[in-house]
Image (tube, rainbow, N blue to C red):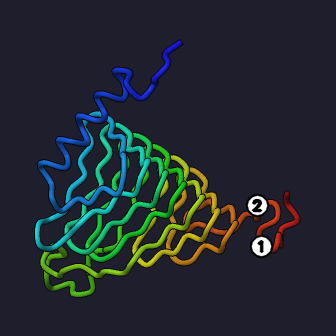
């Protein structure tokens, strides 16, 4: 039995990654101990974007948390799986104790495409903040698009695309995501499911 588990090689490697992150990226604010997997990218654009990580956040291998502009804030004890991409141009907030499964995509911007006489790449972007409440779960390959608000305690089923507001305690799925039912003791269960 290992008496002081915080000093095992698994943790020591993660401490070294955190130290390297803090030295290389002053635009990343770390409010406590954070555990970073292999190949993780956490960065903001100096002078434009910053990332704030709460204490005890776990970030899985090859995950990218990028603040091109604005602020990307992650609450305490949030857990990100492998190869998650959170891309921020305005304001993205992931609540504390939220589980984000593998291959999830969260963004607060879209490309404009209204003018057919100009290339889409030259039309700029539209930005709206994204809020993901505390104690939620985003399943594998979920996409959360600009302007979305995912309420507290929500479950988003695998492969769902969220655009808009998800009420507290809802279980949603589909493209676009729709309320399937509510978690026990949360909201109104309109479908009669438990």
Report whether 100 appears left or right of 34.
Answer: right
84 or 6: nearer the viewer: 6
58 left or right, relative to 98: left
Q: Is residue 47 left or right of residue 82?
A: left
Q: Position of residue 32 (x, y in %)?
A: 36, 52
SS class of the residue under badge 1? loop
**Res. 124 image quadrant:** bottom left
Viewer-side residue, 11 vs 50: 11
Estimate the x, y position of residue 135 in percent, counting from the top left: 60, 58
Q: Residue furthest top?
A: 1
Please state if 82 lies on the left or on the right of 139 as rendered.
left
Is there a contact, CB below 8 Å, between mark 1 and mark 2?
yes
Q: Secondary structure at mark 2?
A: loop
Label at residue 187: 1
Residue at image location 49% in from the left, 46% down from the top:
101
Residue 132 lies, in percent from the top left, at: 50, 67
Label total for image? 2
- The picture quadrant where one finds residue 26 is bottom left
**Residue located 56% across and 77% down the image:** 165
Compared to residue 127, the image places residue 174 above or below, namely above
Residue 133 picture location, percent across and down? 55, 67
Q: CA distance from mark 1 to mark 2?
A: 8 Å
65 versus 164 height, above or below:
above
Instruction: List the residue tagged with mark 2.
Output: 183
* Residue 93 position by quadrant: bottom left
Within 10 angstroms of label 1, few (less than 14), some, or many (20 or more) residues? Answer: few
Q: Residue at 59% across / 66% down in the picture?
A: 177
Q: Quadrant of the N terminus?
A: top right
Using the image, tell me which numbered label, if any, was put on residue 112.
none
Quadrant of the frame with the C terminus: bottom right
Residue under the image location 61 percent in, 68 percent down:
152
Residue found at the very far right of the displayed protein: 192
């Amino acid at each position: 039995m290992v008496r002081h588990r915080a000093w095992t090689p698994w943790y020591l490697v993660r401490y070294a990654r955190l130290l390297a992150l803090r030295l290389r990226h002053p635009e990343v604010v770390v409010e406590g101990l954070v555990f970073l997997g292999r190949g993780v990218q956490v960065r903001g654009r100096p002078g434009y974007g910053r990332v704030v990580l709460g204490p005890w956040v776990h970030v899985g291998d090859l995950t990218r948390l990028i603040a091109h502009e604005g602020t990307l804030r992650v609450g305490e004890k949030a857990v990100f799986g492998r190869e998650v991409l959170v891309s921020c141009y305005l304001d993205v907030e992931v609540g504390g104790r939220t589980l984000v499964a593998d291959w999830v995509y969260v963004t607060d911007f879209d490309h404009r495409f209204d003018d057919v006489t100009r290339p889409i790449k030259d039309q700029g972007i539209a930005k709206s903040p994204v809020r993901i409440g505390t104690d939620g779960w985003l399943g594998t390959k979920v996409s959360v698009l600009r302007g979305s608000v995912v309420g507290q305690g929500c479950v988003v089923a695998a492969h769902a695309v969220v655009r808009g507001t998800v009420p507290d305690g809802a279980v949603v799925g589909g493209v676009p995501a729709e309320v399937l039912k509510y978690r026990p003791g949360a909201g109104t269960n309109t479908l009669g499911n438990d």
